[in-house]
Amino acid sequence: MIYLDNAATTYPKPESVYVAMDKCMREYGANPGRSGHKLALEAGRAIYKTRELICKLFNIDNPMQIIFTCNATDSLNLALKGILKEGDHVITTSMEHNSMIRPIVTLEKLGVEHTVIPCDKKGNIDPKLIEKEIKYNTKLIATTHASNVSGTLMPIEEIGKIAKKNKILYLVDAAQTAGVYNIDIKKMNIDLLATPGHKGLLGPQGTGFLYIREGIALQQMKEGGTGSKSELLTQPEIVPDRYESGTPNTPGIVGLGAGIEFILKEGIEKIQRHEEALTEHMLLELQKIDRINIYGPVDAKKQAAVISINIGDEDSSEVSYLLDKVFNIAVRSGLHCAPMAHKTMGTFEQGTVRFSLGYFNTKEDVKKAVEALKKICDELENK
Amino acid sequence: MIYLDNAATTYPKPESVYVAMDKCMREYGANPGRSGHKLALEAGRAIYKTRELICKLFNIDNPMQIIFTCNATDSLNLALKGILKEGDHVITTSMEHNSMIRPIVTLEKLGVEHTVIPCDKKGNIDPKLIEKEIKYNTKLIATTHASNVSGTLMPIEEIGKIAKKNKILYLVDAAQTAGVYNIDIKKMNIDLLATPGHKGLLGPQGTGFLYIREGIALQQMKEGGTGSKSELLTQPEIVPDRYESGTPNTPGIVGLGAGIEFILKEGIEKIQRHEEALTEHMLLELQKIDRINIYGPVDAKKQAAVISINIGDEDSSEVSYLLDKVFNIAVRSGLHCAPMAHKTMGTFEQGTVRFSLGYFNTKEDVKKAVEALKKICDELENK
């Protein structure tokens, strides 16, 4: 199996991730932050270590500002619903994932206004359009860092500047970039960073986090056992406890820590270079095939390692079915949970066949995928 | 280390849980329910298998009514906030965990009334008191199945009958009983069952579920990618997708499935008998020690395998510290995230030292714990 579905979840993970999780489960599988015995303390320390590793990777000062969640959707919901209140206005883009746009649409019912900035057909945004839409009640700008459909990278540093200048909070969805691109929350003026643990960060499914800049108080989504301030019938205000109710996913968070350690050891620049090289190679080869339409920038410098294509007007599901069944190549087809992005790109009816490359993919994998596509093109033409 | 903190999380897990999780991570670590390729389908099937195992254990008909969450707190928040609206009334008890009572107190601000039924000093509730408090707007009765502080078992079957008779929904928090006591949602008239995966069900931390009886629609807490109805900007209404946004914790859910398979193979009656026997033995031995106060029923038939004690008026943290440091015995001290329960029992100031036994504990473990307590009693007396 050639796995080219890394935008859904990276696979495989580094060996150290499997080992760390298994060790955690077997050797210190206690509940962190509740009891005071040795095993519970060891579990607590392991979770704190992951907080520190996240800080290191994203240039965050205070590990207590990392809120562990169960995925990026969870992080985005906490950020959006925690910040936006009746009468507030939020600006977002037409390339967002449903995990961003669905909560925003839901907030409409509570009296939160939103403006969706249209991107061009390749998924590019003009930051000036964002600035133009800022109103007296604009509380938040919320954008992805890279589209999960076209791969298009957003100019988050530029948008961060606009947010800062206008004293508006900036929320970045780094689902497709964390662990591959250098994200510096200070340099980029990111106030809230929502990230899955199981994609570029190479941790297991069931993990994610939200970074909240110090001084920003969100409404929590849940209340419950925090292991702290047990005497209170209300949720404590201390961070991260306020936002982290219930027993944490200790083995998952430990696995995430191992994933980030792997990234820090390899060097994030090396990871980015590798994925860029694969993307560049694949884009080049795909352009040689007549019937293939490539969406997005078609430029490895302007997109993450996500390539959406179609073969003429063939059904995207059929192409991905053939890739899987005949060629043992795993990709995703359809709408990729981002209907507005498909409308932007003009692929709302057809969907796309999405190839998403990871650090463990090789040039050989790309070669085989391109060969398979050529054969599918021939076969479909002769149908 | 003798681990007697199973009410926080069970440890160790069955070997099959470690193996299943590692195999999932290594062999089919794809994203279930999104893509259509072989690995994604295998991940999807594994999650469905856990749904079916849960159905078998709790006598649930439809696997799609199982909503995976990240812990019991998550499940309780979804249930309470999903059901209760402005003007509704909920009845609960004074023995609840903060994960039940904190969301209920939060809902007060939205105009949801609540009544807390006082339990007696041993944590027992008189179901008639619940029935007496039912009003025209009572929408929900919400109780734990067993106190996490005193172990006291609640008469959930009787309460379920009262709920049914009065056409009120019944939510049960089975955090301390699922996987050890037979819970039949039909026989017991349970409409909503909130359960962690990492306690009696022997799965990993980071898992839990909420069972929702068919026909009950909750307000979801989150919106986002569901892998279904990608074209919609609003959350789809199909279940479980409506409540399960974002990438699921596949390895965790697979581990939970392995835990439940272990329980079904051993037989839940055998597990209950073993924990009851250990509890009975420990209660008997503890009663022989002069200075020890035991809270709760002091009857293994009336309580889960959770025993809270104090030595005279010694600080509970000091006792648990000595148990850990000198005797290598892991317990929990303090308020156990349930302040009202401690007020009910009269231990709000002192907290308690909590011993919680699991299926993998032995009579020898209990013997050593009792011996250690005797020595601590002697030492503290001679201080």
Image (cartoon, coloured by chain):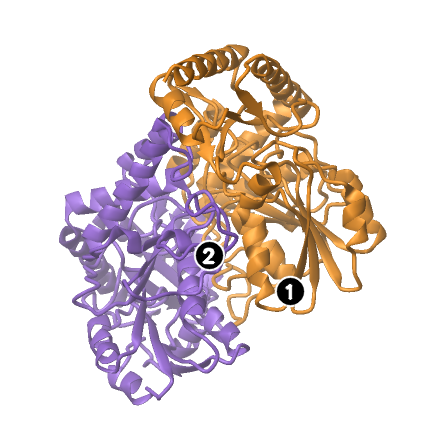
Chain colours: A purple, B orange
Q: Residue at x 69, y 69 (%)?
A: B87
Q: Give the residue at x 69% y 38%.
A: B120
Upstream in sequence: badge 2 or badge 1: 1
Can you tell which of label 2 and label 1 is closer to the viewer?
Answer: 1
| Image location (x, y in percent) of residue B373 | 46, 16
Residue B68 horizontal/vertical position (percent): 55, 48
Please rate how many residues cluster around mark 1, counting C-alpha atoms within 10 Å: few if below 14, some from 14 to 19, many from 20.
Answer: many
What number is the disc on residue B246? 2
User: Relative to A213, does residue B56 appear above or below in the rendering?
Assistant: above
Q: Is residue A188 left or right of residue A202?
A: left
State the residue at coordinates (72%, 40%). B125
| Residue closer to the observer: A80 or A287 | A80
CA–CA distance between discs 2 and 1? 29 Å
Q: Is residue A46 left or right of residue A348?
A: left
Task: Give coordinates of residue B116: x percent, y percent.
Answer: 67, 51
Q: Which residue is mark 1?
A: B112
| Residue A359 seen | no
* Foreground pick, B253 / A112: A112
Who is closer to the viewer here, A149 or A28?
A: A28
Q: How many marks?
A: 2
Seen at 49% across and 51% down, the residue is A232
What amino acid does circle 1 point to?
Val
Task: Tell me if A170 is positioned left or right of A226 in this view.
Answer: left
Q: Secondary structure at mark 2?
A: loop
Amino acid type at mark 2:
Gly
Q: Position of residue A355 (x, y in %)?
A: 34, 58
Secondary structure beneath dot 1 equals: loop
Q: Residues within 10 Å of mark 2 (few under 14, many from 20)?
A: many
Residue B329 seen in this snapshot: yes
